[in-house]
Image (cartoon, rainbow, N blue to C red):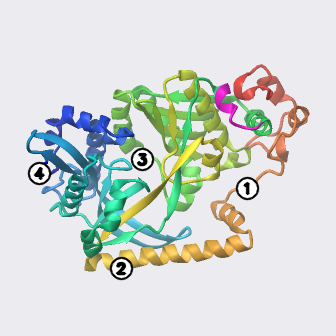
């Protein structure tokens, strides 16, 4: 096959390829929302706006916030593969635990999704790889989050002489499982994957949180543009109180998020959730829904409620809501592993996050600092694990309370005793009300009902 590669940096160029692009996307074994041209354009617009407001270089290649390496079949005159990237002015923060060691401005190319849109033929794949490695668009790092270990792209990156010659390859985070939930036709069918004891425990957690709330447990689903200002205001309150906000400085930028989420809502992709005590926010999830997959994008909870595990309760209620819809078939937890993902997922596959750092004088210090922080943190984790202190130190640094002594409901009889004072934990901002949980929760079914 004769082929040609091109680097496309303007949305108008991609718009001309919309129909054939969708055919390439549908030819993939796993279709991803992040590969939709509309999604790429929305994210690229945000990247370009951020770069412009930050005063970083304007004009030139990649001025619209994206770089797409495209592979064309000259005989048929059509697109056969692509590797879409977002161009981001980013601060590389090197941390040792929660201690910031350094912060370095970097221009990075972020792969959209977890893989590329590539044909099966090795020669065409190698041409596509060379196209984005050699692109004249200036970037100092290629960032690929959650690249499947079985991916052809990973195999090529590991074997490419050009990669070894021109880039430092950082895979320090190691292989992690990407966890997913396959959703059956009903919530009860999903709960059947758990043991009877675990089902009782999960329902008990919902009941316990309900009993601790002053104004009543409430789940709010957010899908429409007009709901977003209030939703982002409440999510911002929770995010600022969360350990990510307090320890890492992460927050919800309401103005920036509003524009992007409005665009998602217009296309029917947005699905956010709020867990509320009456009208007071306790936890939130920002997610996207497309072609039967729900992408679990951003989550946070108020640490004042940590003893009641509001994140677990919110996830359980989200799964019930998704099953009731009958539309989503899969919930994708995204990159990274944790205990709650292991509990709720039904399957997983291995993935790897890859940073290709361009070998240059300006990148020596950031790369060495990053590698030293990772190595130091790994030694600290190993030492803490040896003495079983890692979880205690983590909670101390995050300012989280110790887990409640009673975390499972071993029998139905325990439910009655629990209404008096669940787990011995005080309700944030209010005194316990014996019997109130029973009055509010006994009529509910599904996650609130006694286990079969």
- Residue wearing tag 3: 253
Q: Nearer the viewer, mark 2 or mark 3?
A: 2
Q: Is residue 80 visible?
A: yes
- Residue wearing tag 4: 4
Callout 4: SS = strand
Callout 1: SS = loop
- Residue wearing tag 1: 401
Q: Nearer the viewer, mark 3 or mark 1?
A: 1
Q: Quadrant of residue 98?
A: bottom right
| Cβ atoms at labels 4 and 2 below 8 Å apart | no
Q: Is residue 64 left or right of residue 356?
A: left
* Mark-to-mark CA distance, 3 and 4: 41 Å
Q: Is residue 278 visible?
A: no
Callout 2: SS = helix
Crowd rating for badge 1 (residues with CA inside 10 Å; few <14, some 14–19, many 20+): some
Crowd rating for badge 3 (residues with CA inside 10 Å; few <14, some 14–19, many 20+): few
């Amino acid at each position: 096959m004769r082929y040609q590669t091109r680097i496309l940096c303007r949305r108008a160029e991609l718009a001309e390829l919309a129909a054939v692009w969708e055919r390439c996307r549908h030819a993939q074994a796993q279709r991803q929302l992040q590969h939709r041209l509309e999604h790429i354009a929305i994210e690229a617009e945000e990247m370009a706006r951020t770069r412009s407001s930050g005063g970083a270089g304007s004009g030139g290649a990649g001025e619209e916030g994206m770089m797409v390496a495209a592979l064309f079949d000259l005989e048929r005159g059509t697109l056969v593969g692509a590797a879409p990237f977002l161009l981001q002015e980013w601060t590389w923060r090197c941390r040792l635990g929660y201690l910031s060691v350094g912060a370095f401005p970097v221009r990075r190319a972020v792969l959209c999704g977890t893989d590329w849109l590539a044909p099966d033929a090795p020669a065409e794949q190698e041409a596509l790889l060379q196209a984005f490695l050699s692109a004249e668009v200036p970037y100092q790092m290629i960032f690929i989050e959650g690249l499947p270990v079985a991916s052809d792209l990973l195999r090529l990156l590991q074997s490419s002489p050009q990669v070894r010659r021109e880039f430092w390859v950082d895979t320090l985070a190691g292989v992690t499982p990407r966890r997913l939930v396959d959703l059956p036709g009903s919530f009860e069918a999903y709960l059947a994957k758990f043991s009877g004891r675990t089902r009782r425990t999960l329902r008990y957690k919902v009941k316990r949180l309900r009993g601790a709330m002053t104004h009543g447990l409430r789940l709010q689903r957010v899908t429409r543009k007009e709901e977003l200002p209030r939703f982002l205001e409440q999510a911002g309150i929770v995010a600022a109180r969360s350990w990510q906000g307090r320890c890492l400085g992460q927050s919800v930028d309401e103005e920036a998020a509003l524009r992007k989420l409005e665009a998602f809502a217009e296309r029917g992709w947005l699905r956010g959730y709020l867990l509320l005590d009456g009208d007071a926010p306790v936890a939130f999830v920002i997610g996207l829904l497309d072609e039967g997959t729900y992408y679990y994008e951003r989550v946070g909870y108020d640490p004042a409620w940590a003893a009641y595990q509001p994140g677990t309760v919110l996830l359980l209620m989200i799964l019930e809501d998704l099953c009731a819809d009958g539309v989503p078939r899969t919930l994708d937890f995204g990159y990274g592993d944790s205990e709650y993902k292991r509990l709720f997922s039904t399957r997983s596959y291995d993935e790897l996050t890859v940073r290709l750092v361009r070998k240059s004088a300006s990148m020596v210090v950031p790369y060495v600092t990053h590698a030293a922080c990772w190595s130091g943190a790994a030694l600290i984790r190993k030492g803490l694990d040896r003495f079983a202190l890692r979880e205690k130190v983590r909670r101390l640094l995050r300012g989280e309370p110790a887990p409640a002594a009673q975390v499972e409901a071993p029998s139905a009889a325990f439910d009655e005793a629990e209404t008096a004072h669940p787990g011995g934990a005080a309700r944030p901002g209010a005194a316990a009300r014996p019997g109130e949980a029973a009055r509010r929760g006994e009529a509910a079914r599904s996650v609130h009902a006694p286990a079969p």
